[in-house]
Image: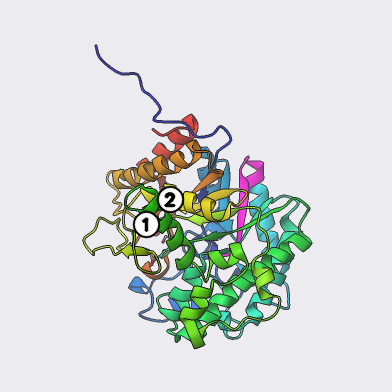
Amino acid sequence: SGALPIGNAGSFPPDFLWGCATASYQIEGAVKEDGRGPTIWDTFSHTPGKVFNDDNGDVACDSYHRYKEDTQLLKALGVKTYRMSLAWSRIFPEGKGKLNPKGLDHYDRVVDDLLANGITPYITLFHWDLPQALPGGWQNRDTAYAFADYAGVVAKRLSDRVNHFMTVNELRCFTDISYMEGRHAPGLKLPPAEGNQVRHHGVLAHGLGVQAIRANAKPGTQVGLADNTSFFVPVIETEEHIEAARKATREENAMFLTAIMEGRYLDSYMQAQGAAAPKVQAGDMKAIGSPLDFVAINVYCPSYVRADASAPGYKILPHLPESPHMASPWLYVGPEVAYWSVRCVHDLWKPKALYISENGCSADDVMTDGRVDDADRIMYLRNCLGHFQRATREGLPLKGYFLWSLMDNFEWADGYSKRFGVHYVDFATQKRTPKLSAEWYRELIRRNALV
Ligand code: PNW
């Protein structure tokens, strides 16, 4: 009859790197074990009313004890790589000063187990679990120096086996959301001058971290960061609107990725902040602009943008509350952002290599007869990957993709109420069950093509 053969909707480059991502506080648990020091997320999640249902990361996915099981989940998926973060306070329980050797020993074991199973670790050094003991947290410039010391120690210990380090994850989240909007630890609502200083300490930590890693790591170690840059989709693909998207990407990220890629704050940003502009010391911008081997971006949702005759030359089109979104209300759907994120970063700054350090979604997963048929998540991922694929087809230097997340985990202020995993976690028993999306991802990796 007229049955068509099973086809591939398009292949990825042969060496494209497929992976999954997680973060220490979201999966490890074991918050009091082997000398780990408390973090601002322990404090925040144990403060009533801060996290949905007053959930916390005390146990999470218990990955501190179950990391070998997690490695086997990765292996079964067929991913070649795993993006994980280290808990700073396991290594320096007070953020600086006395080193806890048990912390480094733990990550040695995790890395060795991954490598023994053919999985390449990509390590994020800071994914929000800031040691509580650091006075003033990111309000204090000293925290940036403490971070660099910690990063250097890790690089020295692990770079014989780990080739890729990301300094920090999502600058906007651990500065703005945490210190200005109050939704994440430490839950402050600082005025603009102090908030801008926190942002500055964040990018400075990244820059000093890059320098410390280069000074301590094996030559050839690749250094970058994972940023949730705000990304813009031109409403119409004409040069005029594409230029508006590029301009918006540069201007709207002036305090984060733009400063890192250009080694300076845009005049427009400094002028707009006026008296509240960050106080910058000699040498800061040089450190912040340290050359990178790669840029990794976390891509979830778009803003749509159009060209505009008046300054600044673009207009961001707001989402309506009823615009389509995934289970998390902030996670608006707009898969073209996958292509335009890569395209705009490439056009603006031409990094040597680009990775997607996170992409994925929450869905209202329910287990029925032992199965989780998460068609919504497959729809979301397939759509995004089609647009990432366009970037690779057009020759943009996109090298790999880390799906967020390997498994359901502690979703910050949403506690355990929002599930992002391709494995379902029953938090009462810690049983991990592959969702239908895991099966789908495995098949995509097997064919190296959209299915
Ligand atoms: C990222 N928002 O966080 C993080 O890197 C992950 O740790 C997290 O689990 C994942 O995305 C899913 O949320 C975000 O409110 C958290 O816009 C919140 C927002 C964006 C990113």
Numbered circle sitting on residue 340: 2
For image coordinates 30% across by 52% down, the residue present is 365
Q: Quadrant of the C terminus?
A: top left
Rate crowding at label 2 as few (under 14), some (14 to 19) or many (20 or more) other CA atoms within 10 Å: many
Which residue was labeled with disc 1?
302
Q: Earlier in the sequence, mark 2 or mark 1?
A: 1
Q: In the rendering, at what x and y percent does residue 337 appear?
A: 39, 51
Q: Do the CB atoms of the residues marked 2 and 1 lie less than 8 Å apart? A: yes
Q: Does dot 1 land on a helix, a strand or a loop?
A: loop
Pair 2/1: label in front: 2
Judged left or right of residue 320, residue 149 is right
What amino acid type is highlighted by mark number 2?
A: Trp
Does any portion of residue 432 appear in the rendered image?
Answer: no
What amino acid type is highlighted by mark number 1?
A: Pro
Residue 125 lies in magenta, yes or no? yes
**What residue range appears in magenta?**
114-126
Judged left or right of residue 278, residue 312 is left
